[in-house]
Amino acid sequence: MRTNWKLELTKEEMQTYGYQVVDAIVAHFDTQNQKLPVAQASRAEMDHLFLEEAPEKATSAKEVLDFVLDNVMTQSQIVSHPKSFSFVPGPSNYISAMADTLATGFNIFSGGWAASPAAAELEIITVGWLLKIFGFPKKKGGGIFTSGGSMANLTAVATARRIKCGEDFSKAVIYLSDQAHSSNIKAIRVLGFRKEQIRIIPTDGEFKFALNKLKNAIAKDQLDGLQPFCLIATAGTTNTGTVDPLTQLSKICKEENIWFHIDGAYGGAAILAKNGKQLLKGIEKADSLTVDPHKWFFQPYEMGCLLVRNHKWLKNTFTEKPEYLRDIEGNESEINFYDHGIQLTRRFRALKFYMSIKTFGLKAFRKAITYNCDLAEKTEKILRKSKQWEVVSPATLAVINFRYNPMSHNFSEKELDDLNQYISGKVVNSREALLVTTVLNKQVVLRMCLINPRTTEEDVTQTLALCEKYAQEKLTV
Ligand SMILES: Cc1ncc(COP(=O)(O)O)c(C=O)c1O
């Protein structure tokens, strides 16, 4: 292949190269279950492999591709592996991976209507699907796809501040629980709020927003002449999958004229589970809702989403009218998504959501999510039956926390923390499963997030057996 300064390839070269790339992706999907999910490498090892000056001279495309396939793609955790249990796994799906490839291949600008009416229309349509799924007003409601949950939360807090405070937010106060995701704090800080404007409300024994403590905090702030303007609830906390008392929180917000944002980045998708409407009761009452299709809607990175009750809130917050965009403003119904969020140039995220839902049908998503919740409940039963394990937080929206705590021993809390940390370290070092710890009630626990529809009960029991093997190893030393 002769590369050149116009960065062009011949048609045949593009085909050959493209088929190699697709073959590699297909092989990955086909064989990932047999691989080890964990990748571990030090900075020194990575430097040794990759460190070089930007090369002036060309290298053969095949050589670069082979090098990348051998050294880059093999040095990442396989977040879609059935034994990738930690953080929030990314189960993904092939149709969406190909849709992303199409969106990139055609380099579609998904900022304004004039540049790509079809991309804007597909975002309107797919956001509409989500509005309906979450019981938001279909006509008045709106939303936007973002890079992920963090950006959706940032977009939400910026909108809440604009609508509730206008220009002056010096007295504004925002409330969230001690289990809220860190991206919310990041968003609040990025927007220039001072630490004194943030209230972290403790959670109760079930890791839910403690309502009385919240009410007291709001009342105190009002007495002090401050402006409670926004509350962030969580529908599916990252640690335990817990859903805050959404209906009661929405009532408080309504009474106190507070913006009600729900961070459903992790758990929102559970609305599609068999009893999802019950689990997430009150989610439809949010002023704004973050959902994160690159988590439990099985989309590849990056795809988050913010939904709002009134699409005008986004437009009123983010519209700027520079002279160089005057010719593409269009009319009201032809949405320019650059006016509804932070990004001007945006990739075409709606395409993968559209194509995967059309191809598999929403029913498949409902089945997969229901399966995930059921598997977590089965895991809880398995753990509860054993004399070795203690369930620390029950299976909730496919998350479960537990620790090795054999009834035959009388360990101190410190010994249990060390033991469970040891188990996790050994499992991860074995690379057989990704199972890391979190801390709940000051205890080190193992956390399993079971949102991969390809994870089987056997994957779970094999991993528990591996944990038990390492526990025994530690106890016999
Ligand atoms: C509840 C919650 N909110 C927000 C986020 C951040 O989302 P992202 O990583 O897509 O930016 C996460 C990520 O795990 C999450 O669990």
Image (cartoon, rainbow, N blue to C red):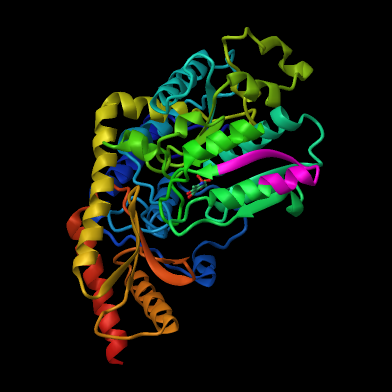
The one nearer the camera, 395 or 218, is 218
Where residue 78 sits: x, y (%)?
36, 55
Range drawn in magenta: 218-232
Report if residue 223 lies within the magenta region: yes
Asked whether, in this view, residue 202 is left or right of residue 35, the answer is: right
Indicate the quadrant where residue 417 lies: bottom left
The one nearer the camera, 127 or 202, is 202
Where residue 201 sits: x, y (%)?
60, 53
The one nearer the camera, 85 or 301, is 85
What residue is drawn where x is 45% and y is 34%? 282
The answer to whether residue 291 of the structure is visible from this angle is no
Asked whether, in this view, residue 79 is left or right of residue 463, the answer is: right
What residue is drawn where x is 32% and y is 72%? 430
What residue is drawn where x is 38% and y is 38%? 269
Indicate the quadrant where residue 85 lies: bottom left
The one nearer the camera, 399 or 33, is 399
**Quadrant, the C terminus:** bottom left
